Image: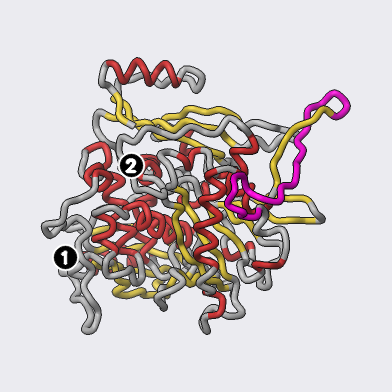
Amino acid sequence: MTPLPEPLFSILALSLPRGHDFGDEPPIEGWKNEADNAVAAITCSDKSKKFGVLLMRRRKDGVWVVESHSHNISELSEARSQAESSLSSDALLDVPPGVSPRPSLFDLRGRSPSEMFKLLTQTSHQGAAWLLNQLYLALPKPDRNWATDCQTENLHTRLWEALLLACFREQGLMVSQLHEAPDFRIENQSGPEGWVEAVTANPPVRFEHVGAKPVGQPRDTRELFLGTAALRFAKTLGSKLQRRYDTLPHVSGKPFALAIADFHAPSSMVWSREALLGYLYGNVPGTEMVNGIRVATGTDAEALMGDTGFSAGLFRDDSHSELSAVIFSNACTVGKLNRVSVSSGRKVKGLRYVRLGKFFDRRENALEGISFCLDVASEEYRQLWPPECEPWSAEMEVFHNPFAKHEFPHMLLPEATHWYENGGDMECSSHYATNILWSQTLILNANCPLPTYEAIPDYLANLAKTRKTGI
């Protein structure tokens, strides 16, 4: 058997029903067989200090299954011996009777793939392709057309579901897909449960994501918070709210959240977070001088811009108390998959992955983020988070409805950033010390020097001329 690095086991463990929640028997080392279709994690009880062996094996359709989990092994050597014996077989498990085999994500079956899916077949994105497949196989019960959608024009919507699963199980939640809707039932081991429906803000007219010219951030603050992007969020969330998921028997009386990712325009997710805030809370920020110091202020808005008549402030009153919260991430990208792969130790020869953007500045009265530009494989980047690799949940934010009939417990998503009202003021609770407001990921030749943040525009222009970079 071969040692299994902890970051790799963490990825495979997303197939476990509770993901990274191992209770009081956490894994202390992992092993795999030569065929890469069986994994054994040696666990150790926090209480008894005795060992166990958790054996995972793939089915014939690639899905991971817990084959066995032994306990109360006195010696570590005995646990290793048991693991080695279990891994000696490279046999695959049969798909249970009555269960439809999971279609292969990369078997096109004569279909014409989208340009975005083709991107996953390139060497520069092989880590992202591998990760997306692992998340697909980890889904409890994906739609029958999940693989087909992913291969064709709906990759971004399926990617959002895959990333949500990774975020949920990274936080140790029991994730199930027991009903057609909502998409996920999530439950914390300590008790709270809730329902989450995934949705994406899509463009009025479809566009090809690969190679599309980015749409820049609106220069006017009011347009940024209440303009076209806010209207797209309003229409998307409004459409889902009309379906009244909260009245379904299995949802009634439970916290219910909508999880939204933005694809309404090329690269719009880099800046559209503010538009979601403008729509949800009906407030446009500004600044003013107080005792010689520029401080943040806010102006209430009754409606979104334009003549649509959409109100601003979904969470302004109790008219939508059935919605407990809105979950958001601006990292539903193939770049996120690449970064998790590289920061977990997977390298692609001849390439370097660079992330640039702005950190959230926690200093009082800070009005701008802190610029950064880092090599994703560097120790400096990996040390930004306690797992020493990029977490799935690093960009996840939960915006709470102060008028919710059923509050969405913070402990239901303990590693997300939570925004909530307290005494009329918006407050933030964050699990990670490092939060990123927005970012972009560059794929450069390994011999390209790391630029400074300020030099990025000129740097990219020069590299484009010499055909040395891809984004």
Q: Earlier in the sequence, mark 1 or mark 2?
A: 1
Residue 407, horizontal then vertical, whole percent: 66, 68
Asked if residue 379 can be seen in this view, the reply is no
* Foreground label between 1 and 2: 2
Q: Kindly give the residue lying farthest to the front in the view shown.
A: 307
| Local secondary structure at mark 1 | loop
Drawn side of residue 343 relative to residue 253, left or right:
left
Q: Residue at x 49, y 46 (%)?
A: 330
Badge number at residue 90: 1
Q: Quadrant of residue 295?
A: top right
Magenta highlight on residue 292: yes
**Image location (x, y in percent) of residue 391:** 47, 48
**For residue 239, above or below residue 189:** above
**Range of residues picked out in magenta:** 290-311
Q: At 60% from the left edge and 38% from the top edge, which residue is drawn?
A: 223
Q: Is residue 303 left or right of residue 381?
A: right
In the rendered structure, find residue 209 and report the number of the disc placed on it.
2
**Which one is nearer the viewer's eye here, 394 or 190?**
394
The amino acid at mark 2 is: His
Magenta highlight on residue 194: no
Three-letter amino acid code at the position of disc 1: Asp
Pick the quarter of the image with the C terminus.
top left
- Quick one: SS at disc 2? loop
Relative side of 196 to 469, left or right = right
